[in-house]
């Protein structure tokens, strides 16, 4: 292991976090919050630990996949451990495990909260909560890659570990420019949303925090009612933008370089939009009540569908009170998740597509064992290696999922609670059903269960393997 | 960068370059170009190889046939500044380049190795509108031929169209140079040479006046060919060119080399395993002695007169064989031995072996392409003519042509705020080579050769701190 380069990158992560904390402190200051000192102290601590590491350049820049994965996993852990400090120091979430849960939930863009009443929080803390979504959405390492002129070709390892999807590709030859373009698109889309929200009469603070929640597909709101009390216009804007942030950013890149056809022909995009349309229609039919205007029902259905499939987790109604059929649709969407290369979580549409086609292929082989088949995505053959790693992903996912449900079940809540609590965290959604429904929160869990769920959020955001790698003893042995 | 048009043609800062073919040369070029900061996209038919390259270097890969329109479009040919085709097939390389010019209006470099085309390269180049045709075998053979004309040197790079050369040699135990300070060189030997770099035990020095030579130093100096001869004579280093050469392996490089050697009257003996190739060579090379047999067979080598040959050049396709043959010849003969290494990466091991001259065809190719790319990068004033990497890339020698007045012209060199670890080694002015002192100045129209431990120089202005 090349520890010196890992130390250097972690140092940068902390330095950048210190900067982000300062921004939050600034926001808090402009509202005259009492929590400003807590943010300043946290920023100072980050800088204290981070800056010395940055100043000492690593001995060599060479690192391989192993180092890349471990660095990313450790970065997220360190980021969360320090990100929880302001909540504890300001006393707004006095318990450290609770604060960590809230922070991890923010960075992993989950949006599951332990807070019963978010409206009493200071502006700085609310801003920081939402800001963690925005940082975590595109990823902090990707951000570092965009701003740091690091040498060496292995930078792609970092990006691969942090970006969601079965196979990560570059947009342009240089990793750094790829990262810049991704953040550029992310920034542009976010600004557009802020403008749209401000246009609907929201204050700048609400518009920005809601946008952070949407852009990262996080789901922290600033009102106890999540998004229910906003005007229909705002709800439509949020629903549409949630959907947009769940699209593979490569598609936007193709549109920007005017390869319209290639961009819009994208199979994953079409499936994604198809699923949203179908789910919205089914839910609308299922929850439509006599006397209510159809437009409102469609909006409610579309909002929840868009919110759940992109794994954002905003809500405009308590869908826990919906008929079972609609609830099951939402649970299915939880697992499918957004597109690869988006800011959303879940298993990802492209993986589901590959697995579905693999199942079809297997049936073919049963019919005629000599058939030679190829699995295609966007008309291109998918590497056997990608198919294998996708299957491995699903298997590992199921194991972790089952084990987590088992551990949560120790507390003795009902099946639906245990099941959806894990589903909502590993898929980075936020609200589940029953006791963790959209109108509830995660505060009632024991610290042990919370740690299990924290692990689930991280493992889900980093797509399982980077985090699991940390538990392998072989990785830490000094020899390669 | 421009986010709304991220793929726009490069603004001169970096070039968008497409490399077609991931062989030996392709990978070397990719490595060098991407480490110089260019945006490189690699095309190859072999997906696993491509994947390996993409995870090693900061480049993008496209799987497919590099001459196909769709593949080239996917690699972004519309915005490319340069395409380099180095697939194993000459014809495919030419097709890649001509296609790319039609689609993308970019500069193009093709590798053409087949001796059938060797005579027509400049004709092909101008007719097809290519920027450059590279023939690594031919280039390598030229370098070997130069070394055979001056066997005392371990490497020779030529500048200013051959009017000046940079020669490297090793100081032997009995050399009169030992203990001499650099500033006394002129008074003791009275020749116009300029020592530009010394490799002592793996560390590179750009020496100052008080630098004293020691046995085992590898010294690089710049001089005119005649001054080199004089200097070597005074140091009692062999300056007579070899009279005979024994080549093991009868590939393309051997053919090119044999042809040049025969033209300058050196007796050539080629040992080649395949009898069909022997017949071909016998037909192509009138006057060469072709021996059909296994060149790695000791008794065959002795029988063929290894003991009597003045130079021995193993050119088989297998690097390990070449190295073994070199070591064998060094042990048993006093011949000048030149080793060709194609592929191997164990640089420090190779450097530790007792081999006097090593030639790396792929580096020769990479150097000329990088020189071209750097020249493309700068638009004004000065242009890179040639570039050599010295001592395993730890120093560079660059030849600039000064086309316009700029911050370095018209001032005595001693008044220029030069960077550290940098030397203005030579000025070539209207047919005359000047070894510059502090009072000389650079003027428009000159060709200036600098030696430096920095890298990435694009224009002459980069020499100032």
Image (spheres, helix red, strand yellow):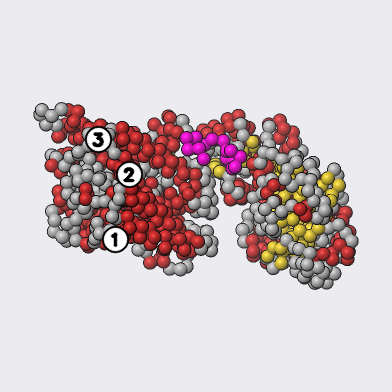
Q: Is A140 left or right of B132, judged from the image as shown?
A: left
Could you say which disc has been placed on residue A209 in the image?
none
Report the predominant secondary structure element of the magenta stretch: loop
Residue at the location (13% across, 53% down)? A414
Q: Chain of mark 1?
A: A
Q: Residue A56 location in percent, x, y?
A: 51, 63
Whether labels 1 and 2 share one chain: yes
Label 3 Cα neighbours within 10 Å, binned few <14 / some 14-19 / many ≥20 = many
Residue A89's tag is: 1
- Please check the rendered image and state whether residue A153 is part of the magenta-colored stretch, yes or no: no
Q: Quadrant of residue A9?
A: bottom left
Residue A240 picture location, percent across and down? 30, 34
| Front disc: 1 or 2 | 1
Q: Position of residue A112 (x, y in %)?
A: 24, 50
Identify the secondary structure beneath mark 2.
helix
Mark-to-mark CA distance, 1 and 2: 24 Å
Which of the two discs, 1 and 3, sits closer to the camera?
1
- Tell me which residue sits at (17%, 28%) in the image: A294
Neighbour class for label 1 at 10 Å: few (<14), some, many (≥20)?
some
Indicate which disc, 3 or 2, sits on the residue closer to the N terminus: 2
Q: In the image, what residue occupies the spot 66% across and 44% down?
A: B374
Mark 2, residue position = A212
Residue stretch rendered in magenta on the structure: B1-19
């Amino acid at each position: 292991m090349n520890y010196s380069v890992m130390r250097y990158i972690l140092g940068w992560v902390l330095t950048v976090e210190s900067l982000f904390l300062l921004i939050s402190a600034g926001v808090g200051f402009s509202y005259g919050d009492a929590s400003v000192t807590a943010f300043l102290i946290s920023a100072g601590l980050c800088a204290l630990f981070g800056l010395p590491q940055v100043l000492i350049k690593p001995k060599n820049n060479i690192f391989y996949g192993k180092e890349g994965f471990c660095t990313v996993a450790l970065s997220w852990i360190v980021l969360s451990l320090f990100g929880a400090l302001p909540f504890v120091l300001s006393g707004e979430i006095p318990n450290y495990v609770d604060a960590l849960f809230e922070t991890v939930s923010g960075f992993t863009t989950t949006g599951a909260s332990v807070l019963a009443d978010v409206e009493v929080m200071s502006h700085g803390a609310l801003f920081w909560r939402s800001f963690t979504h925005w940082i975590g959405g595109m990823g902090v390492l990707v951000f570092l890659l965009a701003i740091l002129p690091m040498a060496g070709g292995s930078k792609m390892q970092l990006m691969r570990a942090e970006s969601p999807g079965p196979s990560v590709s570059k947009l342009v030859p240089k990793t750094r420019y790829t990262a810049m373009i991704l953040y550029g698109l992310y920034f542009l889309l976010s600004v557009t949303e802020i403008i749209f929200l401000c246009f609907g009469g929201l204050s700048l603070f609400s518009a920005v925090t809601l946008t952070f929640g949407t852009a990262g597909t996080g789901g922290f709101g600033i009102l106890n009612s999540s998004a229910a009390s906003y005007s229909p216009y705002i709800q439509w804007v949020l629903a549409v933008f949630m959907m947009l942030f769940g699209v593979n950013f490569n598609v936007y890149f193709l549109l920007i370089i005017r390869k319209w056809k290639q961009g819009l022909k994208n199979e994953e995009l079409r499936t994604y939009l198809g699923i949203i349309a179908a789910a919205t229609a089914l839910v609308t039919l299922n929850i439509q009540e006599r006397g209510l205007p159809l437009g409102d029902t469609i909006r409610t259905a579309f909002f929840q569908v868009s919110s759940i499939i992109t794994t954002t987790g905003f809500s405009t109604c308590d869908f826990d009170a919906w008929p079972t059929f609609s609830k099951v649709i939402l649970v299915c969407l939880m697992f499918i998740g957004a597109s690869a290369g988006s800011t959303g979580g879940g298993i990802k549409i492209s993986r589901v597509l590959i697995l579905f086609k693999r199942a079809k292929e297997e049936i073919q082989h049963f019919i005629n064992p000599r058939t030679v088949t190829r699995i295609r995505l966007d008309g291109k053959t998918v590497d056997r290696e990608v198919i294998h790693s996708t299957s491995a992903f699903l298997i590992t996912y199921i194991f972790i999922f089952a084990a987590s449900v088992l551990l949560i079940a120790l507390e003795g809540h009902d099946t639906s609670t245990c099941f959806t609590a894990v589903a909502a965290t590993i898929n980075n959604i936020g609200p589940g059903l029953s006791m963790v429904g959209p109108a509830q929160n995660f505060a009632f869990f024991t610290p042990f269960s919370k740690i299990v769920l924290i692990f689930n959020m991280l493992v889900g955001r980093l797509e399982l393997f980077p985090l699991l790698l940390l538990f392998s003893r072989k990785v830490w042995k000094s020899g390669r | 960068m421009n986010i709304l048009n991220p793929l726009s043609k490069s603004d001169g800062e970096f070039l968008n370059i497409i490399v077609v073919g991931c062989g030996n040369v392709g990978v070397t070029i990719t490595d060098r170009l991407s480490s110089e900061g260019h945006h490189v996209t690699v095309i190859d038919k072999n997906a696993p190889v491509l994947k390996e390259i993409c995870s090693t270097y900061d480049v993008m890969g496209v799987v497919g046939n590099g001459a196909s329109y769709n593949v080239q479009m996917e690699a972004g040919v519309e915005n490319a500044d340069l395409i380099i085709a180095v697939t194993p097939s000459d014809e495919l390389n030419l097709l890649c380049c001509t296609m790319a010019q039609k689609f993308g209006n970019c500069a193009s470099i093709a590798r053409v190795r087949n001796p059938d085309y060797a005579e027509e390269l400049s004709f092909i180049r101008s007719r097809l509108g290519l920027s450059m045709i590279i023939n690594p075998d031919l280039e390598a053979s030229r370098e070997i031929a130069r070394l055979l004309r001056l066997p005392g040197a371990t490497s020779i790079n030529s500048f200013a169209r051959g009017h000046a050369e940079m020669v490297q040699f090793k100081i032997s135990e009995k050399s009169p140079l030992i203990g001499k300070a650099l500033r006394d060189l002129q008074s003791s030997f009275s020749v116009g040479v300029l020592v530009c770099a010394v490799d002592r035990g793996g560390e590179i020095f750009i020496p100052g006046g008080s630098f004293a030579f020691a046995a085992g130093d590898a010294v690089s100096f710049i001089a005119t060919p005649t001054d080199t001869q004089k200097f070597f004579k005074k140091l009692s280093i062999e300056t007579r060119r070899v009279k005979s050469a024994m080549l093991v392996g009868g590939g393309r490089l051997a053919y090119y080399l044999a042809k040049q050697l025969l033209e300058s009257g050196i007796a050539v003996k080629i040992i080649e395993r395949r009898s069909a190739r022997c017949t071909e060579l016998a037909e192509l090379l009138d006057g060469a002695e072709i021996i059909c047999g296994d060149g790695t067979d000791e008794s065959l080598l002795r029988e063929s007169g290894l003991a009597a040959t003045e130079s021995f050049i193993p050119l088989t396709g297998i690097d390990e064989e070449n190295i073994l043959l070199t070591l064998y010849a060094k042990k048993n003969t006093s011949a000048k031995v030149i080793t060709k290494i194609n592929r191997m990466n164990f640089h420090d091991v190779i450097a530790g072996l007792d081999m006097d001259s090593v030639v790396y065809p792929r580096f020769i190719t990479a150097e000329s392409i990088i020189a071209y790319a750097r020249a493309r990068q700068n638009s004004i004033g000065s242009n890179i003519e040639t570039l050599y990497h010295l001592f395993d890339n730890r120093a560079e020698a660059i030849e600039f042509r000064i086309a316009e007045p700029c911050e370095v012209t018209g001032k005595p060199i001693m008044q220029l705020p030069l960077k550290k670890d940098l030397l203005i080694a030579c000025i070539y002015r209207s047919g005359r080579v000047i070894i510059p002192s502090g009072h000389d100045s650079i003027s428009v129209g000159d060709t200036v050769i600098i030696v430096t431990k920095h890298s990435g120089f694009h224009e002459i202005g980069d020499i100032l701190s």
